[in-house]
Amino acid sequence: MTTLKSITLYHLMINDCKMIGIKFSPDSLIQSLIKGLPNVKWSKKHNMAYIPNTKGNLGIVFNTFKGHVWINYNRFLTNRPVKAGSQRSDVAWFRKRKPVPGHRQCPEEYLLKLELKRYSDSTVKTYVSFFEMFINHYRDKDLLAINESDVRKYLQHLIKRSVSRSYLNQAINAIKFYYEVVMGMPNRFYEIERPRKESKLPKVISKKEILSIIGHTNNIKHRCIIELLYGSGLRRSELVNLKLGDIDSERMLVRVENSKGGKDRQTLLSKTALLNLRTYYREWQPKHYLFEGQKGQKYSGESVLKVVKNAAKKAGIRIRVTPHVLRHSFATHLLESGVDLRRIQVLLGHGSSKTTEIYTHVATNTFENIKNPLD
């Protein structure tokens, strides 16, 4: 069987100049074709050939290898188009801040790229805050003069503060976003080590505990909030963004727009939740969003968290219950009732089945047919 010959293209920065990196397995044909490229050189550090990154040279690479070798662009085409209709990022607040003496603010090009990429407001806040912490750690150093050694020293500084792995990853993401996406230097910090990923099981509570939490809500509005979080498997951000027209009582579905990753989906609507939603609507008369604050604005995520925590505390639930615990419980209870993982993946809006598979580790039916050796 003949193995398909291939090359993989990379973005490289060599002596502060943008290059097209060409990686390949030893092959006489590929080596012969590469020798014919303009100004081609070899990088021992990256173990690949490279040529200046120009539009003309990219075309030459394509024409040189077309019909002879498969060209893998996956690593090279890093800036994918933004999904049409994704939510608009609010970076105006960061631009309008009053300068603080001695505090280095996030560069305008960083804010602009976040805005053009239409990252969610929470992602914008995370990236800006983490990047400003980093650049203020090196307040007197030019951003383009910062190297891998500087980044590692900063990460060591964070580790000494005993921050979580998630915190470290967020810091790395914010730093790499500037150099790789904003400045177009994809390999600038290519070798920066990331902390090993934690493999934590989702926290889940029983159906009996869910009903107890619902029974300890203060009013019909709070009851509907908890019933939708659990009965539809919604994220907190998805719940507060629901509009009146997103409740489809004919098909018994809830429409979720611009969810995580800018995706739309539909999920289940509980008959119990629908009855309570009708009572809630008659009493509260929301105008635009399904759940609104006192002045008609969108209900806040903090308020949703407070509703869940207060009801769980009154119900005597010992573990810390959050909206995401209710979402985890929704998925786990579906799995225990015999719903297949693919359907649960669709209802939750997971991009990968691997994300959904975590619930097999907490579902009781995973273990019920296993005989304990002690028994």
Image (cartoon, helix red, strand yellow):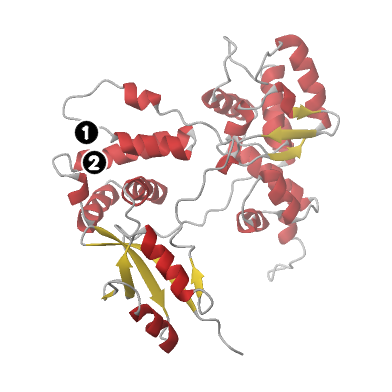
Residue 127: image quadrant is: top left
Determine the secondary structure under disc 1: loop
Residue carrying label 1? 104
Is the C-beta separation of discs 2 and 1 under 8 Å? yes
Q: Nearer the viewer, residue 359 or 374?
A: 359
Question: Gap between marks 2 and 1, in whole Å?
Answer: 7 Å
Residue found at the very far left of the displayed protein = 140
Question: Residue 374, relative to residue 257: is it above or below?
Answer: below
Residue found at the very far right of the displayed protein = 250
Determine the secondary structure under disc 2: helix
Label 1: how many residues lie within 10 Å, few (<14), some (14-19) or many (20+)? some
Determine the residue positioned at 62% across, 30% down. Answer: 312
Which quadrant is the N terminus positioned in?
Answer: bottom right
The amino acid type, in three-letter code, at marker 2 is Ile
Counting from the top left corner in percent of width and height, residue 215 is at: 72, 25
The amino acid type, in three-letter code, at marker 1 is Arg
Question: Residue 43, relative to residue 150: is it above or below?
Answer: below
Q: Is residue 288 left or right of residue 282?
A: left
Q: Nearer the viewer, residue 101 or 38?
A: 38
Q: How many marks?
A: 2
Counting from the top left corner in percent of width and height, residue 287 is at: 68, 13
- Among the two numbered marks 2 and 1 on one chain, the one whose residue lies closer to the N terminus: 1
Which quadrant is the C terminus positioned in?
Answer: bottom right
Would residue 95 be visible to someone looking at this image? yes
Determine the residue positioned at 37% across, 64% down. Answer: 57
Determine the residue positioned at 28% across, 36% down. Answer: 107
Q: Nearer the viewer, residue 255 or 371?
A: 255
Counting from the top left corner in percent of width and height, residue 158 is at: 28, 47
Determine the residue positioned at 65% across, 29% down. Answer: 315
Counting from the top left corner in percent of width and height, residue 100 is at: 21, 24
Residue carrying label 2? 135
Q: Is residue 285 left or right of residue 34?
A: right
